[in-house]
Image: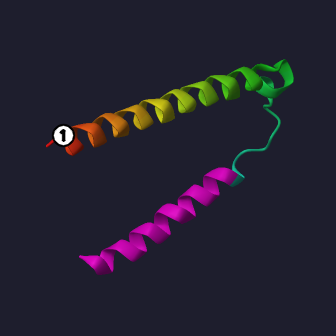
Amino acid sequence: MPTLKKPALLIAFALLSLMSFAQDGSNDVMRSNGKIYVVVAVVTVIMIGIFIYLLNLDRKISRIEKNK
């Protein structure tokens, strides 16, 4: 089974690199309208929220483990 992993990964990465070359950059609608900054802000807020949630969850789990 491990012998199949390397060729599969090689093919997957080759296809990913081909997909990145397919973008010509002429469709910068989000950047030209300024909406890309809204998308970046929303993603940043979501990531910060997830990070805070995970920190709180870790503290609660640590507190529960300490009490046992």
- Residue in the picture at 41% in, 74% down: 7
Most foreground residue, 34 or 23: 34
- Residue in the picture at 78% in, 44% down: 24
Q: Residues within 10 Å of mark 1 (few under 14, many from 20)?
A: few
State left or right for residue 7 relative to residue 46. Answer: left
46 is within the stretch colored magenta: no
Disc 1 marks a residue whose amino acid type is Asn
Quadrant of the image containing the C terminus: top left
Q: Which residues are magenta?
A: 1-20
Most foreground residue, 54 or 68: 68
Against 35, is 20 above or below?
below
Q: Kindly give the residue lying farthest to the left in the view shown.
A: 68
Quadrant of the image containing the N terminus: bottom left
Mark 1, residue position? 67
Q: Main secondary structure of the magenta part?
A: helix
State left or right for residue 22 relative to residue 3. Answer: right
- Residue in the picture at 82% in, 20% down: 34
Against 20, is 10 above or below?
below
Residue 51 percent coordinates (x, y): 49, 35
